[in-house]
Image (spheres, rainbow, N blue to C red):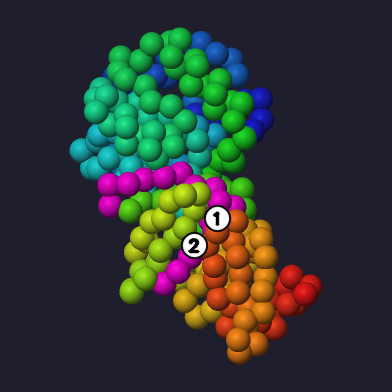
């Protein structure tokens, strides 16, 4: 992140946006790059402006701040700003950078801005559908009421689950309403490998490779889980990992 922190304000209340813009103007190393007052406008602004940080209201007439993030391919750093502290637990479970309760006080905002400035989280680039993500890109993962910010490199494996895909990362997993093939097309090709018909695995998470019956392999991942490599994919694995 460069020395200038580029901030987008998302809030449906005009006075709230004005108050935040006034507070931000006190720090020369902060640039307010724009404002949005609803979910569609926020998604469009994040995509086109690529801010370093979004000051994001939780409740808006057209949806929630979580709905904003759920519509993005990659996400910038986020600080939730709301009049209701009941959302704090959910916000931090999602690994938000910070959570500010209105009326926002300058010292608390400054603390959040400094944290964002020091944190090495790339802003969301204006990615067209079909372009691949980078390992350092951050994505927003949502499974019902559970939400997370996840770096692409943290994804360990993806497994077909009915008509959906189960994503495994850290010590968590989430069910995504997308096909494995669609997700494979977005993930870095040099990082993720199709181990078998139903599984994608992060090659950087492999700790050991063991030959298995039928000329395939068994992969042990860094969380102790195992993935079977089919005989059909075994040759490609050898070539990818120079076995």
Residue at (54% x, 48% y) in the render = 151
Residue in front for this viewpoint, 112 or 148:
148
N-term mark: 1 or 2:
2
In the depicted structure, whether residue 144 falls above or below residue 6 = below
Determine the residue located farthest toward the right in the rendered image. Answer: 242
- Write down the quadrant of residue 223 in the picture: bottom right
Percent position of residue 119, x then y: 59, 31
- Check disc 1 and report the residue beneath it: 223
Residue in front for this viewpoint, 8 or 116:
116
Query: Is residue 157 covered in magenta?
Result: yes
Residue at (49% x, 25% y) in the render = 32
Tell me the quadrant of the picture where the N terminus can be found. Answer: top right
Determine the residue located farthest toward the left in the rendered image. Answer: 61
Percent position of residue 66, x then y: 33, 42
Tell me the quadrant of the picture where the C terminus can be found. Answer: bottom right
SS under mark 1: loop
Residue in front for this viewpoint, 220 or 55:
220
Q: Which residues are magenta?
A: 144-160
Left or right: 40 as drawn, with respect to 192 = left
- Write down the quadrant of residue 41 in the picture: top left
Query: Is residue 28 covered in magenta?
Result: no
SS under mark 2: loop
- Check disc 2 and report the residue beneath it: 129
Left or right: 70 as drawn, with respect to 152 = left
Determine the residue located farthest toward the bottom in the rendered image. Answer: 214
Would you call the spot at circle 1 few (<14 residues within 10 Å), some (14-19), or many (20 or more)?
few
Residue in front for this viewpoint, 79 or 236:
236
Determine if residue 119 is in view: yes
Percent position of residue 231, x then y: 61, 87
- Write down the quadrant of residue 17 in the picture: top left
- The CA distance from mark 1 to mark 2 is 31 Å
Would you call the spot at circle 2 few (<14 residues within 10 Å), some (14-19), or many (20 or more)?
few
């Amino acid at each position: 992140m460069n020395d200038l922190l580029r901030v987008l304000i998302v809030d449906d209340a005009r006075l709230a946006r004005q108050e935040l813009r006034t507070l931000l103007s006190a720090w020369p190393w902060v640039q307010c790059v724009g404002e949005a007052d609803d979910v569609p406008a926020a998604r469009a602004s994040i995509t086109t402006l690529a801010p370093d940080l979004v000051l994001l209201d939780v409740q808006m007439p057209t949806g929630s701040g979580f709905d904003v993030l759920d519509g993005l391919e990659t996400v910038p750093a986020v600080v939730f700003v709301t009049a209701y502290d009941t959302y704090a637990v959910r916000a931090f479970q999602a690994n938000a950078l910070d959570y500010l309760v209105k009326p926002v006080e300058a010292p608390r905002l400054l603390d959040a801005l400094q944290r964002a400035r020091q944190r090495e989280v790339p802003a969301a680039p204006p990615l067209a559908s079909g372009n691949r993500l980078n390992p350092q890109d951050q994505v927003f993962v949502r499974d019902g009421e559970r939400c997370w910010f996840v770096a692409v490199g943290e994804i360990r494996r993806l497994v077909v689950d009915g008509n959906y895909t189960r994503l495994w990362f850290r010590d968590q997993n989430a069910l995504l309403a997308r096909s494995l093939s669609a997700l494979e097309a977005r993930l870095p090709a040099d990082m993720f490998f199709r181990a078998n018909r139903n599984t994608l695995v992060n090659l950087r998470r492999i700790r050991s490779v063991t030959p298995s019956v039928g000329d395939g392999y068994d992969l042990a991942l860094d969380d102790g889980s195992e993935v079977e490599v089919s005989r059909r994919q075994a040759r490609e694995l050898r070539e990818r990992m120079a076995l």
